[in-house]
Image (cartoon, rainbow, N blue to C red):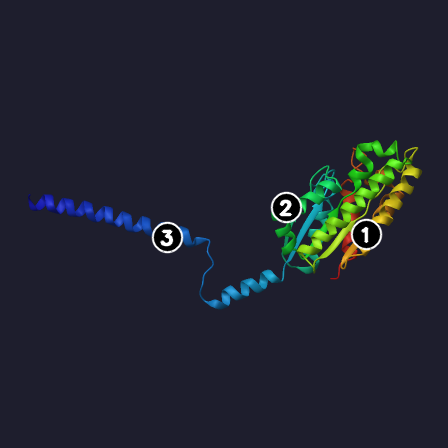
Amino acid sequence: MGKNTIRTITAIGGFFLLLWVIGLGWAVGQYYADRPDKVPVTNTVSKKVENKKGLTIVALGDSLTRGTGDETGKGYVGDLTDEIKEKTKKPVQLTNLGINGQTSNQLRKQVQQTEVARQIQKADMVLVTIGGNDLFRGGQGLTDYSSKNIAAIEKKYLENLKFILEQIRKNNKTANVFFIGLYNPFIELDQGKEMSKVVRHWNYDSAEVSAAFSKVVFVPTFDLFELKVNDYLYSDKFHPNSKGYRLIAERVASLLTW
């Protein structure tokens, strides 16, 4: 084998070795790119402290928690989060677990899920909307609001509500819980006044269940929609529009300690 051949082989070998070293360096760099720097220690500590100064919010419930009807897509949860960020100048981590159409029985099952329980454990604040689908049932509540059926439905709902709040407290004993009461979207219909009596009674009983738990605050919304309900409803005449959700967010914000 000639000297030129040996030089060629050596050169090729060196070239591939260099590529391997470069590739290895790139792979290691990518592997550690998203990992926190272990030194100096003060950087790690300060980062943890900064995160501690933020606020973690978990929102549970139905379409009101999802913000259905809000043209901006925020709902009261998003509006409240924005206001907290603005007032505190601190980061807010929001987990919205609301489900359109959810009833109290379905939320009862949801709060027993392992991942949901884990999210509640981390929360500084828990927001809850539930009961509207139990009571109104897609408008059916307008036809049987005076029957004994409503009493049976409310009894089951209150049992579910108590269980839901117990589960929240079981997983997190210190978080502030804000439970949003119902408004009457049908107040201007012929059955509106009678339905309002039912909603007020429903809210009263819900507030009584809430009062049995520490740091659980019942947030009334009935009065917010009472005088100009259609000004604050979406085109479906059931869910709030952006103005309506803003009213709810402001009501919750007024109860926070800044």
Residue at 59% x, 60% y is: 51
Q: Nearer the N terminus, badge 3 or badge 2?
A: 3
Q: Nearer the N terminus, badge 1 or badge 3?
A: 3
Residue 113 is tagged as: 2
Whole-percent x, y for residue 163 in the image: 74, 49
Label 2 CA crowd tier, 10 Å (few <14, some 14–19, many 20+) = few
The residue carrying mark 3 is 28
How far apart in space, not on screen, are marks 1 and 3 (Cα)? 56 Å
Going by the numbered disc 3, the residue's amino acid type is Val
Label 1 CA crowd tier, 10 Å (few <14, some 14–19, many 20+) = some
Q: What element carries label 1?
A: helix
How far apart in space, not on screen, are marks 3 and 2 (Cα)? 38 Å
Q: Which of 63 and 133 is in front in this view?
A: 133
Asked whether the beta carbons under mark 3 and mark 2 sit within 8 Å of each other, the answer is: no
Viewed as shown, does residue 101 lie left or right of 41? right
Instruction: Indicate whether 87 appears above or below 231.
Output: below
Viewed as shown, does residue 36 lie left or right of 96? left
Q: Is mark 3 on a helix, strand or loop?
A: helix
Q: Quadrant of the C terminus?
A: bottom right
The quadrant holding residue 214 is bottom right
Q: Is mark 2 on a helix, strand or loop?
A: loop
Whole-percent x, y for residue 178 in the image: 76, 53
Q: Nearer the viewer, mark 1 or mark 3?
A: 1
Going by the numbered disc 2, the residue's amino acid type is Gln
Residue at 71% x, 38% y is: 100
Residue at 80% x, 56% y is: 212
Residue at 58% x, 62% y is: 50
Label 3 CA crowd tier, 10 Å (few <14, some 14–19, many 20+) = few
Instruction: Indicate whether 20 appears above or below 43.
Output: above
